[in-house]
Structures are given as structure tokens and as C-alpha cells.
Amino acid sequence: MSRAADPSRVLTRDPASVARAISMVEDRRPEAEAAANELLHALAGSGRRASCQRVGVTGPPGVGKSTLASALIRSWRAGGRSVGVLAVDPSSPHSGGALLGDRARIELDPDDREVFVRSMASGGQLGGLARAAGAVVEVLSAAFDVVLIETVGVGQSETDIEHVADTVLFVVQPASGDVLQFIKAGIVEIPDVVAVNKADLGAVALRAVAELQGALRLGAEARGLHQPPVLSTSASTGAGVEALRSALDAHFAALVQGGQLPAVRLAKSAAWATRLFAQRYGERGIEARGGVRAVRGALEIELARGATLFEALDGVAAQR
């Protein structure tokens, strides 16, 4: 393993080392997986990932996710917490790389070494996240106090963010038609916290808050779940940002204090691994191992034993 990818340097948040570590886990070549696994095991051995707060930010295009993310990052930094950012951008139709739109819109102090931003192309994935997103989050979680994952603008089926984040923040804007569309689509089932951005629009923002609260209340009652809070924010003025950051922190604190975090992360990781297994081995690979539920159960066992994501995929694929 090269010095640039030395786990000890990643843990000290050396930007070059963090960047190269991410490049290692993004490398799709089969011969690169051994080095990626070695790195991920070393980072897991530090024990620091357990205390990292992972926040996913999702919502339709143009809602102001990046501006709101910038405000949240500044709030966490003001409290002395380091922040790693994974900005998932649309893929270039020519190069396949990230178009860097989200990264360009995230406004931060370039001299602040306690903040790290990495762009990643979505790879055209319908779920809104690239294949390596889960492994990248694991790298960032070992180095930073907070990891923020911002997805591309979501559509009606793009819910992968719930598999890699402890807390999902769903952002909408008033008077856009998005509120009713996403209520109908069912995407409002995934958030833990909801923000109606651009609250400076006044009455229409209040109406959007009321509509979402009603929809979320009905959904929560039907499924016997806790209703996520709906907050009004304005990323441009800063109104409501501190309350939103407090709500995100409170959700994570409840998972930790209730002892639920390890089980929640394991279940989410198994769900993410199941999606990747289907991409790699197809329907026949799933059917050969007893169906989706059996594959997910087997992956969860592998991950609980301490396997990396890549090792879990290979381990279950080798089972007969």
C-alpha cells in the first residue's frame, strides 16, 4: 500500500491521502480490490467510523440542496466538527465523469483542512448513487466527524441514499408541484427530516409545510412509524438552518443513545450490497442463491462478520 493511501494519514484527514484512498475504492479493476479491502479493513480497525454521523441530502433538481448543504457544513464547522462531503453529480455523456455541478455550488473556505469535498459521477444509476458510493462513505467516515452525501436531483424511484446515510434529509421547495408529485410517488417514505427550502416565499412555503406534514402523518400512521419533522428553511438568508442542523443531530443522537445504530447500519449496508450484487451477477445470480431475500440475508451475515462490501459480494457469489 502506498504511503499516500496509508490509513494513518487518512485518519489525520490529509487531503491527498483521503483523495487517493477514495480513488482506490472507486477502482473497478478486479486486481485493485485486494488493496481496497486492505485499506477498508485498516480504517475499520480504528473504530472511528462508529462515532461518525452520516447525513444524506436529497430532493428534486433546483431546490437548493447544495446551498443548504453549504450552510449546514458551516454550522457543523462552527461547532468544531470536521466534515467530509460526497457530492454525487450527473455523469458526462462524453467522458462518463462527474459534471461537478454540486461541487461548484458548495461554497466553503478553501483553506479549511477540516472540510473535504469529493465529487463522484452517478454513473447513470437510477437510484441516484454510484456503485462505489458506499465504500467512499466508509473511507470518509473513518476520517471525519460528519459525512454529508448529496445526491443528484432525485426522481420518483431514486431512494438509494437511505442505504448509505444514517439520517436522510429530503429537501423540497414550495410552489413547484414537487410536493404532490413526491407524495404520490412514495419517496416521502424515506426521509428522517424534511426541509421546505426557500421559506422566504412566505404563504406558499407555509402551505407546502402543511401539505407535507399531512402526508407524512398519514404515512407514519399507516406504517406505525415515527413522523419525521418538517422544517422551513432559507439557504440564502440562513433562516432555519440552525434548527435543521439540530434536528439532524438529534436524529443521529437518538440512534446512538438507543443502541440502534449498529443494527441500522448493518441493515442498510446489506440492502446496498444486495443492489450491487444484482448489478454484478444479474437475475440469474440472484435466483441461483435462493432469491433476493436469501441473498440479502447472506450478505448481512458476511458484513456482520467484518467483511468489506467487496468481500461480502464475492463471498456470497462463491456460495453454492
Image (cartoon, rainbow, N blue to C red):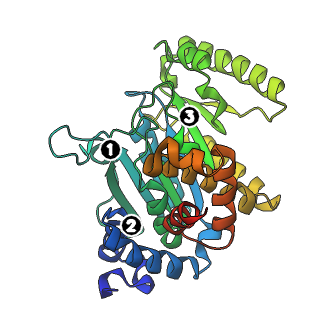
Give how far across and how far down residue 55 sits, in percent.
56, 50
Residue at the left extreme of this rendering: 94
Q: Is residue 101 above or below residue 320?
A: above
Quadrant containing the C terminus is bottom right
Mark 2 nearby-residue class (10 Å; few <14, some 14–19, many ≥20):
many
Residue type, label 1: Gly
Percent from the top left, x then y, of residue 227?
A: 76, 32
Task: Please tell me whether mark 2 sits on a helix, a strand or a loop.
Answer: helix
In the image, what residue occupies the spot 53% across and 57% down? 76
Report whether 310 appears left or right of 113: right
**Tag in front: 2 or 3:** 2
CB within 8 Å, label 2 to label 3? no
Kindly identify which residue carries mark 2.
25
Identify whether 132 is placed above or below 128: below
Disc on the earlier residue, 2 or 3:
2
Whichever of callouts 1 and 3 sits on the residue coming sooner in the sequence is 1
Residue 39 location, quadrant: bottom left
Circle 1 residue:
123
Residue 163: in sight, yes or no?
Answer: no
From the viewer's side, name the closer residue of 196 and 239.
196
Of the residues shown, which amino acid type is indicated by label 3? Answer: Phe
CA distance for labels 2 and 1: 15 Å
Which residue carries the number 3 mark?
A: 170
Q: Nearer the viewer, mark 1 or mark 3?
A: 1
Crowd tier of the residue under label 1, counting other residues whose Cα lies within 10 Å: few below 14, some 14–19, many 20 or above: many
Spatial separation of the CA atoms under disc 1 and disc 3: 22 Å
